[in-house]
Image: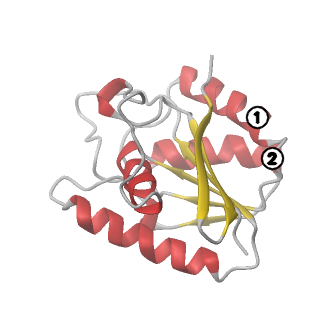
Amino acid sequence: MLTDLYLIRHGEPARKADIPYQTLPGPDLSPRGREEARQAAAFLAKVGLEHLFVSPFARTTQTAEVLVEHLNIPVTFTSLVQEHGPHEPFDQVRERLRELLAAAKDSPYQRIGLVTHGSPIRALLLEMSCEKIDLSKHVYAGGNPAPTCGIWHIHRVDEHTQRFELVFRPS
């Protein structure tokens, strides 16, 4: 049974005017983004992750490569956690994530990580808290609910209680 979900935002991208941000493949990680991913890997090495689900964008894939190098766990690439599309309604993002959550709950894993983007992280936090989470103290560049390579931990305490905490920010 899934008890712990880690929402990992990708590392800092190398933004370039000629590379669209919200369409595949998007920008690569910057050198700073790779360092952020190494720091996130060091933190995640202590939590016992069993599997990563990763967005197919370049910045998330490259973040996951650094994580897997340190964690040596299986990875599934899935469009269910990909960036919020340019014309995609937010409700559709939430629906994609509900599909992933349903599959994760039926999996043998207890602790999984999602390497994703700011909007899907926001969608999951709102979905899993039934809209009760206050994200007003968690507004980072671009209005994201996590900094680059920031990690939210959602812990299922019991059938009716979950804890939400931003547990990691790279230096």
Mark 1: amino acid: Phe
Q: Position of residue 6 (x, y in %)?
A: 63, 51
Q: Which residue is mark 1?
A: 43
Which residue corresponds to the image point at 62% horizontal and 26% vertical from the top-left? Answer: 36
Question: For residue 143, which quarter of the picture?
Answer: top left
Q: How far apart are the two marked residues, 1 and 2, measured between alpha carbons?
A: 8 Å
In terms of depth relative to the viewer, which is nearer, 10 or 132? 132
Which residue corresponds to the image point at 59% horizontal and 40% vertical from the top-left? Answer: 165
Q: Quadrant of the N terminus?
A: bottom right
In terms of depth relative to the viewer, which is nearer, 153 or 119? 153
Which residue corresponds to the image point at 40% horizontal and 43% vertical from the top-left? Answer: 118
Label 2 SS:
loop
Q: Which residue is mark 2?
A: 47
Label 1 SS:
helix
Marks 1 and 2: CB-CB under 8 Å? yes
Q: Position of residue 30 (x, y in %)?
A: 50, 25
